[in-house]
Image (cartoon, grey):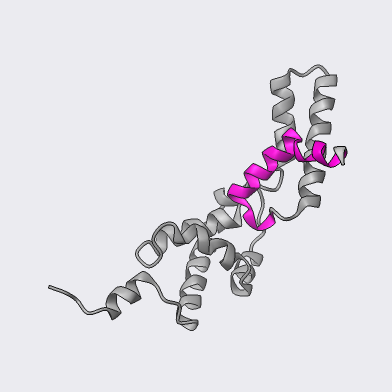
Amino acid sequence: MKENNKQEFSYFRLKLRSYMSEHHPERLHDTEFITTRADMALTAYCDAVAQGFTHLEAESIASEVLYHGLHFSKYDTLVSVLENEFERELPMPLPERLAPILLSNKAVQATFDKFGLTDTFAASEQYDRLYTELTGTVVLLIESNKLPTIRLTEEASPKTL
């Protein structure tokens, strides 16, 4: 029991869970990944200190291990599409609430699967293509499922003078 409490309060585990809750909420339930990655970061930190690095340098090395493969976020990208392209139809806080639901949609998953997503993907030429394809996918999902949006609701209601 004490061991579980120790893991729950691991600095790197808490740091990773906090990061993932903001940028990868769809993976937050993957406790095995979080535990393994936090343990790897702790090992990297301890090894760096043992090799003579300062604590700040060791923290930086451990952070590289902790966040490897997590710099690009499907969630952040989808929220960005929803906020920028559907601002009228989906005002705040709807994009942040809708993004996790959309991430589990097969059409949205298929759109992401077309691209080799890496830590540096957001800076690549392909990012704009992904962004455009995600926008189109969301439009198709709204239209094909006849999902209500704010604009549709406003258009359907009688205008008052």
Residue plotted at (82% across, 45% down)? 36
Residue closer to the observer: 120 or 109: 109
Q: Quadrant of residue 153?
A: bottom left
Residue in the picture at 48% in, 67% down = 135
What percent of the width, then of the height, locates residue 140?
49, 77
Query: Magenta segment, which residues?
Result: 3-27
Residue at coordinates 56% horizontally, 51% vertically from top-left?
A: 122
Q: Is residue 7 within the magenta segment?
A: yes
Residue positioned most to the left: 161
Quarter holding the C terminus is bottom left
Q: Position of residue 61 (x, y in %)?
A: 73, 30
- Horizontally, residue 151 falls left or right of residue 25, namely left
Q: Quadrant of the N terminus?
A: top right
Query: Which secondary structure dominates the residues rendered in magenta?
Result: helix
Position in image of residue 137 (x %, y %): 52, 72
Furthest residue in direction front, as rendered: 1
Above-or-below relation of 118 to 11: below
**Visible in this render: residue 72?**
no
Q: In the drawing, does residue 14 fall left or right of residue 86?
A: right
Q: Is residue 123 above or below residue 143?
A: above
Q: Residue at x 52, y 68 (%)?
A: 133
Vertically, is 90 above or below 157?
above
Residue 123 among those drawn in magenta: no
Quarter-of-image position of residue 125: bottom right
